[in-house]
Amino acid sequence: MRPIRSICVYCGSGEGLDPVFTAAARVLGRMMAQAGIRLVYGGGRIGLMGEVARSVLDAGGAVTGIIPEFLKAREVMLAEAQELHVVSDMHARKKLMFDKADAFIALPGGVGTLEELVEQLTWAQLGRHDKPILIANINGFWRPLLSLLAHMRESGFVRPGLEVKYLVAERVEDALEMLFAAARAAAPQEEEEKDIIQRM
């Protein structure tokens, strides 16, 4: 697993009803900037998306925004981002977000956030990538999804060898260190695999 230099954050284009969601987005953005981690996100300035991006920028960090043409007005494109990509559609957006990210964090959000998170979980389950995925379970927001994933395992639809791998942080303050630890843990295994291949 390569070092984590950029993180794609999935989150709502709305703020939600609990102020703790906005506070968490701001804390995460500040932490990423302080750690020198580039934010990759959906490119808007409203909702939690805007909060995390502006927090990164306010703390001197780097932001890559990726937004489809048809959402430039609806999600109010954040023109201040150092790197901004306007793409043709949602598929292009998600592909470029994936390509530019070393890891993923899901903050609270709606159906779009859920879809983006589940897509990355699916790709990882199928062995298409090994980038760490973290669910920021702020104030228990993702608890129903976590219960559903457990129910899928218990019902035999997530079979041995096809586990859905993800991290869960109950506090946003723990998110970065959990991702860094996952990357460190993966590094020795990758080196060992390289040594075995070289000896063959």
Image (cartoon, helix red, strand yellow):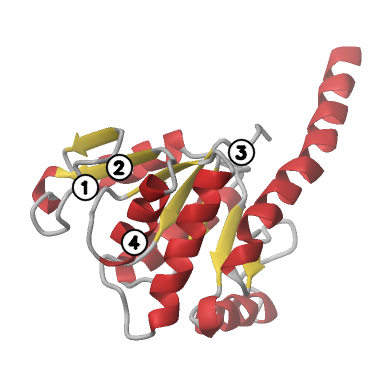
Label 4's element?
helix
Nearer the observer: mark 2 or 4; the answer is 4
Name the residue nearer the viewer: 164 or 64: 64
Q: Which residue is mark 2?
A: 65
Which residue was labeled with disc 4?
A: 51
Q: Pointers 1 and 4 in contact (CB under 8 A)?
A: no
SS category of the residue bearing label 1: loop
Q: Position of residue 128 (x, y in %)?
A: 56, 41
Circle 3: residue type: Ile
Q: Distance from label 3 to label 2 (Cα)?
A: 18 Å
Q: CA distance from mark 3 to mark 1?
A: 24 Å
Q: Which residue is mark 1?
A: 78
Circles 1, 2 touching at the beta carbon (< 8 Å): yes
Which residue has dot 3 on it? 4
Counting residues from the start of the chain, the first of labels 3 and 2 encountered is 3
Q: Is residue 122 visible?
A: no
Are dots 3 and 1 in contact, CB under 8 Å?
A: no
Q: Amino acid at mark 1?
A: Leu
> Which one is in front, 161 or 39?
39
